[in-house]
Image (spheres, rainbow, N blue to C red):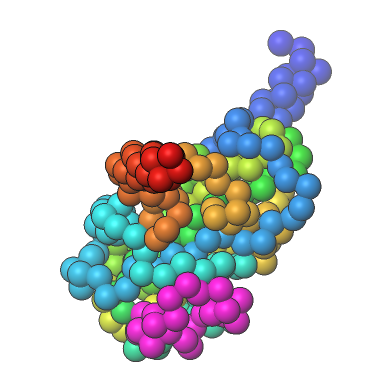
């Protein structure tokens, strides 16, 4: 092979290696719905407090979420708890001490403000907004204890188990603009520290928790058939309730017609 050809082959191989190195770990091509005209306002935060103290895995936390409505719901403009520079705090801290003002102002059950953060499960549900085709995001989720990030039902970050404030990083490419379903899961069951952050950076930028514009709440943007709404008291009728409600309305209508004769 001629020297010039060898140089060209080497350069091409190096380029291909670099492309492979830059490839995202996950790619999503089909959003749930179109991107709204307005910027995001955060995710729907949910709390299950005073759960089984032996909740030590994400599978156990997911079972608690699937087993009934949340103790409280709120709007999470960022996932940065405790709010501020500190990554973690004592498990004896109360939710009144660690939730930011927006979260506290939007709580639908303020009794949790006096609960300490030990033995709790949290979920942050909604949508991640992608503005342009081909966006590549770096996501990072440090936590104490376990946490995870699911996008479109695929677990892209798994930080399971009992551990100190640490967590994995991954890259995600979005082929088309729009809203993509996202869940951030978290549980805390062991002393003595507690904390959670969800961080992101676009196209190689440093990750940050300041993602509000890209986060869209479950309660404002989900379609009625989104099963995640089942965990919010009063958002979706219990099974069979629609039939009962329809029968009651028909009965009332018949009674009114009978009374007018």
Instruction: Give the percent coordinates (x, y) of residue 124.
Output: 48, 60
Instruction: Give the percent coordinates (x, y) of residue 217.
Output: 58, 56
Rendered residue at 37%/64% (across/down): 70
**Quadrant location of residue 210?**
bottom right
Is residue 178 at all visible to an observer of this figure? yes
Instruction: Give the percent coordinates (x, y) of residue 164.
Output: 37, 73
Is residue 25 at all visible to an observer of this figure? no
Instruction: Give the percent coordinates (x, y) of residue 10.
Output: 70, 25
Rendered residue at 66%/28% (across/down): 16
Helix, strand or loop for the magenta stretch, by majority:
helix
Q: Nearer the viewer, residue 249 or 73?
A: 249
Rendered residue at 81%/18% (across/down): 4
Q: Nearer the viewer, residue 38 or 20?
A: 38
Residue found at the far right of this picture: 4
Rendered residue at 78%/47% (across/down): 37
**Quadrant location of residue 11?**
top right
Magenta segment boundaries in residue numbering:
95-117
Quadrant in the picture for the N terminus: top right
How many callouts does the rendering have? 0
Q: Nearer the viewer, residue 67 or 124?
A: 67
Residue found at the far top of this picture: 1
Q: Is residue 10 left or right of residue 149?
A: right
Quadrant in the picture for the C terminus: top left
Q: Is residue 127 left or right of residue 55?
A: right
Within the magenta stretch, is there residue 166? no
């Amino acid at each position: 092979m001629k020297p010039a050809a060898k140089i060209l082959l080497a350069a091409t191989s190096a380029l291909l290696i670099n492309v492979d190195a830059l490839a995202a770990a996950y790619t999503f091509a089909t959003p749930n719905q179109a991107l709204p005209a307005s910027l995001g306002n955060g995710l729907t935060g949910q709390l299950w407090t005073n759960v089984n103290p032996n909740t030590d895995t994400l599978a156990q936390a997911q079972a608690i979420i699937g087993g009934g409505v949340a103790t409280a719901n709120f709007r999470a403009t960022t996932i940065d708890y405790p709010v501020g520079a500190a990554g973690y705090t004592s498990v004896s801290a109360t939710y009144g001490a660690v939730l930011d003002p927006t979260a506290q102002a939007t709580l639908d059950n303020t009794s949790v403000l006096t609960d300490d953060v030990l033995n709790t499960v949290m979920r942050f549900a909604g949508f991640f907004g992608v503005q342009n085709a081909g966006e590549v995001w770096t996501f990072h989720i440090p936590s104490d204890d376990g946490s995870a990030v699911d996008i479109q039902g695929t677990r892209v970050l798994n930080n399971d188990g009992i551990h100190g404030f640490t967590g994995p990083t991954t890259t995600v490419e979005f082929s088309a603009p729009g809203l993509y379903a996202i869940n951030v899961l978290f549980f805390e069951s062991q002393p003595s520290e507690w904390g959670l952050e969800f961080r992101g950076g676009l196209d190689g930028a440093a990750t940050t928790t300041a993602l509000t514009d890209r986060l869209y709440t479950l309660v404002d943007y989900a379609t009625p058939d989104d099963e995640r709404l089942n965990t919010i008291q009063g958002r979706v009728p219990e099974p069979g309730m629609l039939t009962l409600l329809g029968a009651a309305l028909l009965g009332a209508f018949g009674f009114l017609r009978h009374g007018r004769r």
